[in-house]
Image (cartoon, grey):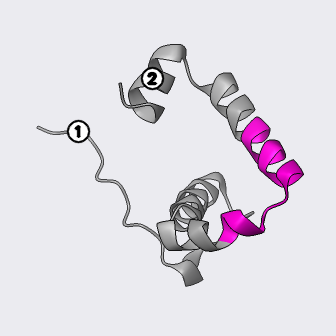
Amino acid sequence: MNTRKTPPAPLKAGELCFGLNRETDERSLEAFLHRFAEPAFLRALIPRLEEEEITTLLDFLSRLMHRHCSEKEYHRLFLKD
């Protein structure tokens, strides 16, 4: 018998909600980040960022990964090597 839960379906843009509960926050954050990482959106956004904004964003994301991922996870999940 398979005891693994089926992950919930991805949220649509109008379903994003933060502050209700942890599960909804996590699902909303995942959907938000997927939308943020869409190539068309990034092509529009990145040229508009100031150098300081690029540095700040990279520093923030790097700190999160360092704090919450082991080196093995970082290489396997992020670098895909």
Q: Main secondary structure of the magenta part?
A: helix
Going by the numbered disc 1, the residue's amino acid type is Thr
Identify the residue position indicated by label 2 in the image.
75
Farthest left residue? 1
Farthest bottom residue? 14
Labels 1, 2: front one: 2
SS at badge 1: loop
Q: Is residue 80 left or right of residue 70?
A: left
Farthest top residue? 71
Q: Which mark is residue 54?
A: none
Residue at the spot x=44%, y=31% of the render? 79
Total marks shown come to: 2
Identify the residue position indicated by label 1 in the image.
3
Q: Is residue 72 above or below residue 46?
A: above
Q: Is residue 40 magenta?
A: no
Q: What's the CA distance linking mark 1 and mark 2?
A: 28 Å
Residue at the spot x=69%, y=24% of the render? 67
Contact between marks 1 and 2 (CB within 8 A): the answer is: no
Q: Earlier in the sequence, mark 1 or mark 2?
A: 1
Q: Where is the C terminus found, in terms of image quarters?
A: top left
Q: Is residue 3 left or right of residue 35?
A: left
| Residue 43 position within the rendered picture, expressed as x and y whole percent measured from the top left | 58, 69
SS at badge 2: helix
| Residue 9 position within the rendered picture, expressed as x and y whole percent measured from the top left | 37, 66
Quarter of the image where one finds residue 55: top right
Answer few, some or many: residues within 10 Å of disc 2's Cα (few below 14, many 20 plus, some between 14 and 19): few
Q: Where is the N terminus found, in terms of image quarters?
A: top left
| Residue 5 position within the rendered picture, expressed as x and y whole percent measured from the top left | 30, 47
Q: Is residue 73 above or below residue 57?
A: above
Residue at the spot x=85%, y=59% of the render? 50
Q: Which residues are magenta?
A: 45-60
Going by the numbered disc 2, the residue's amino acid type is His
